[in-house]
Image: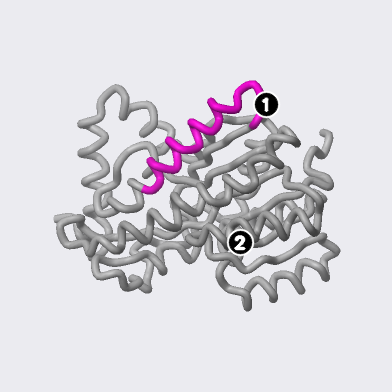
């Protein structure tokens, strides 16, 4: 099979840990020129040393995706170094775990700033280059973007917003051959749950789920490249997610009930 990723320029946000880091490695293994973006300059620097020692062509760019200026700078630095952008992976994201009735509204604002506006800002400045190359814009999402999850109001809202935004970008550019993909992993072993925000905006610290039984970031990364290769529109990686996307149109009340039961079973669940 032809390696379509060789020498392609790829930006990955949220690339310091978990899914983002795994995606960066997977593209680099396939010969892409990869730009790793995340808030932690220290973590990025360590990854840069490691990946260059492996012979990968990478660049790091410390970026807080809630800042439009920093997202613009990310794209500018990429173009200065590599000349263009072929693929943008909007992976940076945070989660939350609390009932809306208990929630400080600053938590929802924070999730929208990272998950939604981060995607908007990066896409805005990368889009002309990606369109020129007939490349791909990818949003790393969740089943929470297809059906609301109790205890995750801000997370679901931000992912629904991401979906609407990316769907529209796809339609606006139909005749320009832009590929837009939304990928929805299942629960994945990563730092996301440990950094999930509670009702008061503090981090929960410990994951309420058994990380060892979850999907690996490497599996998600392989699915991202496979989805781009096959020009996928939506790629939902779990059977539960696929059934959710189907049944929420047919029997939405049943899906509501099943997610209520599932989330209520979590240790220390806010759902009663």
Percent of width and height locating residue 258: 25, 40
Residue 44 image offset from top left, x and y in percent: 65, 71
* Residue occupying the point 77% across, 66% down: 51
Specify whether 92 is left or right of 134: left
Q: Quadrant of residue 243?
A: top left
Compared to residue 217, the image places residue 164 above or below, namely: above
Q: Quadrant of the image for the C terminus?
A: bottom left
Label drawn at residue 15: 2
CA gap, disc 2 and disc 1: 27 Å
Q: Is residue 159 magenta?
A: yes
Q: Residue at x 38, y 57 (%)?
A: 111
Mark 1 residue element:
loop
Relative image position of residue 138 (x, y in whole percent): 58, 42
Secondary structure under the numbered disc 2 in the rendered image:
loop
Point 54% across, 53% down: residue: 91
Q: Position of residue 134 (x, y in %)?
A: 72, 32
Graded by Cα atoms within 10 Å as few (under 14), some (14 to 19) or many (20 or more), the crowding at tag 2 reads many
Start and end of the magenta stretch? 158-178
Read off the residue under disc 1. 177
Image quarter for residue 249? top left
Report the mark closest to the observer, 2 or 1: 1
Which circle marks residue 239 in the picture? Answer: none
Examine the structure image and report whether residue 144 is included in the region drawn in magenta.
no
């Amino acid at each position: 099979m032809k390696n379509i990723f060789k020498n392609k320029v790829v930006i990955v946000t949220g690339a310091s840990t978990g899914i983002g880091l795994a995606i960066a490695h997977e593209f680099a293994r396939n010969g892409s020129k990869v730009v790793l973006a995340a808030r932690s300059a220290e973590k990025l620097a360590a990854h840069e040393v490691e990946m260059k020692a492996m012979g990968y062509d990478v660049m790091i760019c410390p970026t807080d995706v809630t800042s439009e200026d920093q997202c613009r700078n990310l794209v500018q630095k990429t173009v200065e170094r590599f000349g263009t952008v072929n693929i943008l992976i909007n992976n940076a994201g945070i989660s939350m775990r609390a009932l809306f009735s208990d929630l400080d509204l600053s938590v929802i604002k924070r999730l929208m700033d990272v998950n939604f506006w981060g995607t908007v800002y990066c896409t805005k400045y990368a889009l002309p280059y990606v369109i020129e190359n007939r490349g791909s814009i990818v949003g790393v999402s969740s089943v929470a973007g297809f059906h609301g999850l109790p205890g995750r109001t801000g997370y679901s809202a931000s992912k629904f917003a991401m979906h609407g935004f990316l769907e529209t970008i796809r339609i606006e550019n139909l005749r320009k051959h832009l590929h837009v993909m939304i990928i929805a992993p299942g629960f994945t072993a990563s730092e996301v749950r440990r950094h999930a925000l509670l009702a008061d905006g503090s981090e929960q610290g410990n994951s309420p789920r058994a990380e060892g039984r979850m999907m690996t970031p490497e599996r998600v990364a392989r699915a991202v490249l496979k989805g781009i290769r096959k020009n996928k529109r939506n790629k939902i990686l779990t059977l539960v997610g696929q059934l959710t996307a189907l049944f929420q149109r047919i029997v939405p009340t049943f899906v509501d009930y099943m997610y209520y039961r599932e989330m209520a079973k979590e240790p220390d669940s806010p759902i009663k």
